[in-house]
Image (cartoon, grey):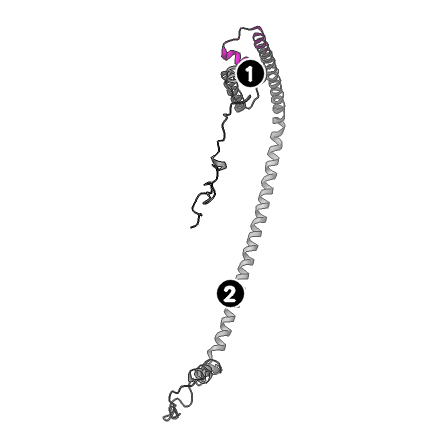
Amino acid sequence: MTTAHRPTFDPARGKDSLRGPGYHQRLLPAHKTLKFRQATQGTTDEHATRDLRAELLRAERRHFAKKEGRELSPEEEEVQLAIEEGSVGNESTAKGVKRNLEVEIGSDQDGEQDEEDYEAKRRRVLEESRDVDADSDDGSEEDSDSSDDEDDDDEEAELMRELAKIKAERAEAAAKEAAEQAAKEEEQHMRDVATGNPLLQPKGYEVKRRWDDDVVFKNQARGTEEKKGKEFVNDLLRSDFHRRFMSKYVR
């Protein structure tokens, strides 16, 4: 009887010899010690020292700043964190906020002064351009009248040239079409002359049937050949079927 159906980890047992207890390697005890979290793997002490709320707020500020297309400096992050936590009373934070406000106020004043200078310069340029336009309007009226007359004459001459060109093109197209029509009519006339006379057409007088179609005695020799009866031939190359096949398709 074969032992192929028995599992491989079942120990072999001898029939005649007695052996001691044997165990397979897979049956031996293993993994007898538990694994514990090591450092930097999120232990309880590490979670106790981390400020998860501050990390969450910092990540949110960075996300919104990136969405707006700007980057937050470490000082701005600290100020925002202090404002959100409600601890803006320390001196360093107050000084930083005051410094930022002073910079913003100074930049606003500079911007207003630049806007005033730009408006004054713009008004001055507009007044100068208005004076120049008033002087040039008087002298340009007379020139415009004479130039308008010359432009009208030039446009009329150009239109006349275009009209003459169009007439010449149409006349050329009509002459070409008339020549083509005359050539077609001449060709048709010559064809009619050539095919109109039946005596010049030899195809019409050809004999379309044989000379012996109306003969009384016709095909008299058909059926007079001797007919042999069927005979058995042991050689396939000399059989009647092979002879008929060769005479019909090969010869």
Q: Residue at x 53, y 68 (%)?
A: 183
Q: Which of 178 and 39 is in front in this view?
A: 39
Read off the residue under disc 1.
77
The overriding secondary structure of the stretch rendered in magenta is helix
Q: How far apart are marks 1 and 2 (CA)?
A: 94 Å
Which residue is denoted by mark 2 in the rendering? 181
* Extreme residue toward the left, this view: 216
Q: Nearer the viewer, residue 54 or 8?
A: 8
Is 33 located above or below residue 161 in the figure?
above
* Residue 104 left/right relative to 251: right
Q: Earlier in the sequence, mark 1 or mark 2?
A: 1
* Coordinates of residue 164 in the picture (x, y in percent): 57, 51
Q: Would you say residue 214 sits in the magenta stretch?
A: no
Quadrant of residue 223 in the image? bottom left
Q: Where is residue 119 in the image (x, y as percent from the top left)?
A: 59, 17
Badge 1 element: helix
- Would you say residue 82 sits in the magenta stretch? yes
Residue stretch in magenta: 73-99
Residue 40's place in the image compared with 100, above or below, is: below
> How many C-alpha atoms fall within 10 Å of the one at disc 2: few (<14), some, or many (≥20)?
few
Picture residue at 55% right of the left edge, 61% below the top: 176
Three-letter code, disc 1: Glu
Give the residue displayed 56% in from the left and 55% down from the top. Answer: 169
Query: Residue 6 falls in which quadrant of the image?
Result: top left
State the residue in front, 170 or 218: 218
Kind of residue indicated by mark 2: Gln
Q: Is residue 82 left or right of residue 127?
A: left
